[in-house]
Image (cartoon, rainbow, N blue to C red):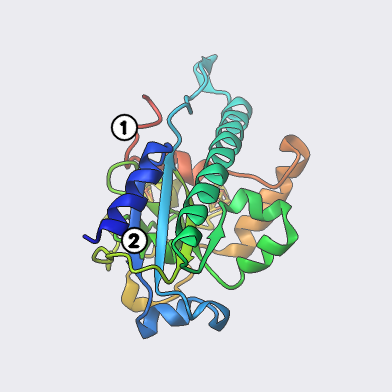
């Protein structure tokens, strides 16, 4: 690994990142996943922070209080998103000081609130950065799943032309025969498809059904939200949600 890669990874880890991966995005397949506006970038740095403070609220009358669960999830998301924003600033400063071009792409929650960044999401996906850096696959629930932490991570990305050493990409889903997210979705929006890189931009979720259910939750939670298929995923549960 190049000293520059080591330095950047160590800067990000010291700043609180739990996972940092570097993906080579110079291949044709990857270029197709990124709009031509970004084709001068050669590496995607995927930065993950785990939802380490997120705990399920106590059961009430033997049932989990879904409302409290959702609010706890949203709050944890917001806290981590702020921390990732700080990390992105540090890392881009580090790269620009060394005369490399770079662009920071914050977590999706921020994108909803900032118009310019929101526009980028039509042109770029964090899933590409994470899978190309070998840190996870796209689960049947459409989320990035990491072998150690499951879906319990918030991701940000830096696109750059810095000479960073890439890792091997993740090519296949590791969901196997699991169907817990498929069964848990209240509107049958999880289609039960195993992702693979070779299959390209594959829709694993019925987006119309999912977004209409999320919109129904707006009255209760102040914005469209649903984490049911996320909470159903057993991957990494011991390491994070119960921690
Ligand atoms: S977010 Fe909710 S509605 Fe959408 S796929 Fe997951 S469980 Fe279904
Ligand atoms: S619940 Fe099972 S099938 Fe769904 S994303 Fe998690 S591991 Fe994959």
Percent coordinates x, y for residue 96 in the rendering? 50, 61
Mark 2 and ligand 2: say if the CB distance to the nearest ligand atom is below 8 Å: no
Please name the residue shown 43% across and 52% down the image. Answer: 182
Mark 1 and ligand 2: say if the CB distance to the nearest ligand atom is below 8 Å: no
Please name the residue shown 74% across and 60% down the image. Answer: 115
Which residue corresponds to mark 1? 239
Q: Is residue 127 left or right of residue 137?
A: right
Disc 2 packing (10 Å; few <14; some 14–19; many ≥20):
many
Quadrant where the C terminus lies? top left
Mark 1 or mark 2: which comes first in sequence? Answer: 2
* Marks 1,2: beta carbons within 8 A: no
Q: Is residue 119 left or right of residue 231?
A: right
Q: Is residue 184 left or right of residue 177?
A: right
Percent coordinates x, y for residue 177 in the rendering? 27, 55
Quadrant where the N terminus lies? bottom left
Percent coordinates x, y for residue 40 in the rendering? 48, 80
Please name the residue shown 33% across and 56% down the image. Answer: 21
Foreground residue, 8 or 120? 8
Q: Is residue 61 above or below residue 191?
A: above
Which label belongs to residue 101? none
Which residue corresponds to mark 2? 22
Q: Is residue 145 above or below residue 116?
A: above
Nearer the camera: disc 1 or disc 2: 2
Which image quarter: residue 242?
top left
Disc 1 packing (10 Å; few <14; some 14–19; many ≥20):
some
Which image quarter: residue 67?
top right
Please name the residue shown 60% across and 44% down the image. Answer: 226
């Amino acid at each position: 690994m190049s000293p520059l890669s080591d330095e950047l990874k160590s800067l990000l880890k010291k700043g609180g990142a739990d996972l940092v991966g570097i993906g080579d995005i110079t291949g044709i397949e990857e270029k197709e996943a990124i709009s031509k506006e970004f084709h001068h970038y050669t590496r995607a740095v995927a930065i993950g922070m785990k939802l380490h403070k997120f705990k399920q609220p106590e059961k009430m009358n033997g049932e989990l209080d879904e409302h409290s669960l959702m609010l706890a999830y949203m709050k944890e998301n917001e806290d981590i998103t702020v921390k990732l924003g700080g990390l992105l600033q540090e890392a881009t400063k580090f790269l620009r000081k060394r005369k490399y071009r770079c662009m920071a792409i914050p977590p999706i929650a921020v994108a909803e609130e900032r118009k310019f960044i929101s526009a980028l999401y039509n042109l770029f996906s964090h899933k590409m950065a994470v899978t190309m850096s070998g840190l996870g696959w796209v689960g049947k629930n459409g989320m990035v799943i990491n072998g150690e932490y499951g879906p319990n991570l918030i991701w940000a990305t830096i696109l750059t032309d810095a000479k960073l050493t890439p890792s091997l990409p993740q090519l296949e889903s590791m969901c196997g025969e699991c169907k817990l997210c498929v069964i848990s979705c209240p509107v049958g929006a999880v289609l039960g498809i195993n992702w693979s890189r070779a299959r390209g931009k594959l829709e694993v979720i019925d987006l119309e059904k999912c977004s209409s259910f999320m919109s129904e939750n707006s009255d209760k939670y102040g914005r469209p939200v649903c984490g049911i298929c996320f909470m159903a995923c057993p991957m990494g549960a011991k390491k994070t949600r119960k921690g």
